[in-house]
Amino acid sequence: MLLHLRNVLTAEELQTAQSLLRDDAPWMEGRISAGSQAATVKNNSQLSQSSAQAKQLQALILSALKRDALFFSAALPRKIFNPLFNRYCGDANHFGPHVDGAVMHSQATGEWVRTDVSCTLFLSDPTSYDGGELLVQDTYGSRGVKLAAGDAVLYPGTSVHEVTPVTRGERVASFFWIESMVRSDEQRRTLFELDMNLLKLRAQLGETPETTALTGVYHNLLRQWANT
Ligand code: NI
């Protein structure tokens, strides 16, 4: 499942993020943090994880995610990898097809995080650069994603994906992974669909004995499937 999350960041948060990620930020070669397969196709820059800018931005993004109900419903997060930041421009402008490692070690927290769900949070105005599409392969073919600054996409951690070459301007984004309380994509999707349709039913009908009962079904499924 690919899911578009709109306005994850407020206009003010976006401005803070953009100003902390200018040219004078500690950008490093992205290849150094990639696994051996990904390193052969990765050609971008990445913000030093231990920098003051990264720490400030990580806190900003994690607090934005906390207030996002759609993010919570879709990802059912148990752990969130500390958000990372990358930049595509000039000669360091693409990341070819790869899969992310199944388990990632966070330098910031010392934690291991299983990568059930991947997230890219776009930080550059899409009219300011050409290319730089996130392509996610699924059974139906490749899906191209290029979103407004401040919007994010959730996609399965299991997918082969790439970022196409940026041929004008620069594309800055945050990316991170979520270890979900519900490991299975299929179960997580079932819960998400139930939750979203319950919201609609409540908006149409108010609280009825059926919406109450179906809310019970949601929680009983979550209780069966969740690991906390
Ligand atoms: Ni990746």
Image: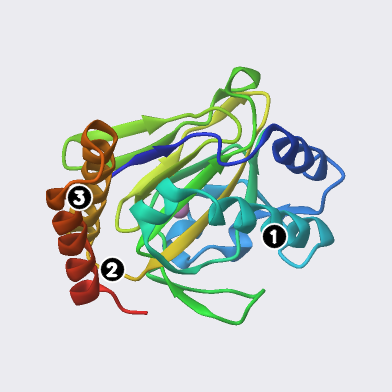
Residue 162's label in the rendered image is none
Kindly state the secondary structure of the residue where label 2 is placed.
loop
Q: Which residue is mark 1?
A: 59
| Above or below, comparing residue 113 to residue 38 in the picture | below
Position of 185 with respect to 8 (left or right) is left
Q: Name which of mark 1 and mark 3 comes first in the sequence.
A: 1
Q: The residue under label 3 is which amino acid type?
A: Leu
Q: Are marks 2 and 3 in contact (CB under 8 Å)?
A: no
Q: How far across and down, in percent of the image, does residue 96 sit?
A: 44, 44
Q: How far across and down, in percent of the image, does residue 21 sit?
A: 77, 43
Position of 113 with respect to 220 (left or right) is right
The residue located at (55%, 57%) in the rendering is 66
How far apart are the two marked residues, 1 and 3, measured between alpha carbons?
Answer: 31 Å
Q: How far across and down, in percent of the image, does residue 222 sit?
A: 24, 68
Q: The residue under label 2 is which amino acid type?
A: Val
Q: Nearer the viewer, residue 33 or 3?
A: 3
Q: Nearer the viewer, residue 87 or 194?
A: 194
How many labels were placed on the picture?
Answer: 3
Residue 182's label in the rendered image is 2
Position of 162 with respect to 188 (left or right) is right
Q: Which residue is mark 3?
A: 194
Q: The residue under label 1 is which amino acid type?
A: Ala
